[in-house]
């Protein structure tokens, strides 16, 4: 089964705090992979979907929800015909400093993927499915694209037909979903005992999140000191805030970002593995090979073969 190219997606749309789409995947297919600056909340409305995030794999059923951290590489594939999902991308300002008791909403996303809140019990699933259907039917939608038996519909288009207080209504729906997840979260007391993230802290580290990313799809290595300086923070301050907000160290974040860029170049260009290694901040071809196998479970050449791309004359 072939893998699609890893996509670096501008989601939500530039200039907006949130974007809501409906995806309709008409038949089982290959994994789609992406990374984007917004947080992502997915409510499965029908069918069955396999999700993979940072070595954690799960299968989503109707009424179940998945949370994806900003700039977190992830992939998914439909496992049944007519798999339909509501997908909401949003920036931190969309929810501001919303808290559940003393737990900031960012803490739900910053937990490791296997420890993030999920749905427990049929009653919660029914309520979440109802909320998802209500959001889906709240406003007109426009077909944005249709690729490989997958249709993507943009909710709230055309703009002049959006209902009154469209953004406020969606903010309330998203808040209700996160509250249900928090109430059923087995790790909520553990999260409450830790220093809390905040949207203000997220704003302080934003300059580091896009560092090293080039217009040609490359992503060069950025060290901790460079990132801290770009944010106007000491190294220790930056390290602490970054871990609290993103849930991983900056070094791990930087590595996975460069591996996503390498995967994208492997599946969209015929450049050699050595050339891609140089463009993505790896010391050489063998260094990229080792890190790539750890991340994707296959060699760069094997990953490229799955995509159907032919390597350049300098070798794979």
Image: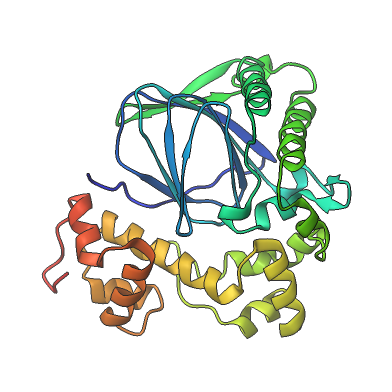
Q: Check the image and tell me how it is coloured.
A: rainbow
Residue drawn at x 28%, y 54% is: 268
Report the quarter where the C terminus lies: bottom left
**Is residue 290 visible in this depiction of the protein?**
yes
182 is higher (above) or lower (below) than 6: above
* Image x and y of residue 252, in percent: 53, 72
**Is residue 218 visible in this depiction of the protein?**
no
Residue drawn at x 74%, y 24% is: 166
Image position of 234 (left or right of 109) = right
Q: Quadrant of residue 242?
A: bottom right
66 is higher (above) or lower (below) than 116: above
Report the quarter where the N terminus lies: top left
Image position of 278 (left or right of 118) = left
Q: Nearer the viewer, residue 153 or 176?
A: 176
Q: Report the number of numbered marks.
A: 0
Image position of 286 (left or right of 188) = left
Residue drawn at x 76%, y 48% is: 105
* Image x and y of residue 108, in percent: 70, 50
* Image x and y of residue 301, in percent: 20, 65
Q: Nearer the viewer, residue 162 or 94?
A: 94
- Residue that protrudes farthest toward the left in the picture: 313
* Image x and y of residue 147, in percent: 33, 31
Q: Nearer the viewer, residue 180 or 2?
A: 180
């Amino acid at each position: 089964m072939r893998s699609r190219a890893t996509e670096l997606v501008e989601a939500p749309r530039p200039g907006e705090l949130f974007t809501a789409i409906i995806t309709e995947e008409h038949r089982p297919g290959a994994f789609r992979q992406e990374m984007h600056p917004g947080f992502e909340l997915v409510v499965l409305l029908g069918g069955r979907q396999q999700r993979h995030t940072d070595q954690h794999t799960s299968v989503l059923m109707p009424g179940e929800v998945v949370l994806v951290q900003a700039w977190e590489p992830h992939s998914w594939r439909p496992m049944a015909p007519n798999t339909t999902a509501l997908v909401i991308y949003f920036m931190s300002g969309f929810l501001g400093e919303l808290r559940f008791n003393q737990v900031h909403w960012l803490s739900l996303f910053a937990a490791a993927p296997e420890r993030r809140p999920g749905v427990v019990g049929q009653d919660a699933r029914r309520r979440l499915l109802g909320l998802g259907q209500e959001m889906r039917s709240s406003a007109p939608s426009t077909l944005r694209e249709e690729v490989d038996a997958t249709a993507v519909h943009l909710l709230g288009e055309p703009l002049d037909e959006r209902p009154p207080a469209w953004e406020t209504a969606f903010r309330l729906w998203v808040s209700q979903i996160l509250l249900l997840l928090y109430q059923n979260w087995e790790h909520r007391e553990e999260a409450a005992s830790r220093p809390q993230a905040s949207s203000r802290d997220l704003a302080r580290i934003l300059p580091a999140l896009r560092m090293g990313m080039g217009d040609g799809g490359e992503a060069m290595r950025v060290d901790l000191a460079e990132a801290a300086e770009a944010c106007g923070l000491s190294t220790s301050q930056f390290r602490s805030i970054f871990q609290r907000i993103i849930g991983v160290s900056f070094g791990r974040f930087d590595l996975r970002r460069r591996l996503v860029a390498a995967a994208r170049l492997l599946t969209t260009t015929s450049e050699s593995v050595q050339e891609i290694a140089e463009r993505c901040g790896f010391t050489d071809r063998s260094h990229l090979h080792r890190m790539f196998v750890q991340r994707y479970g296959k060699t760069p050449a094997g990953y490229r073969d799955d995509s159907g791309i032919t390597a350049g004359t300098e070798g794979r």
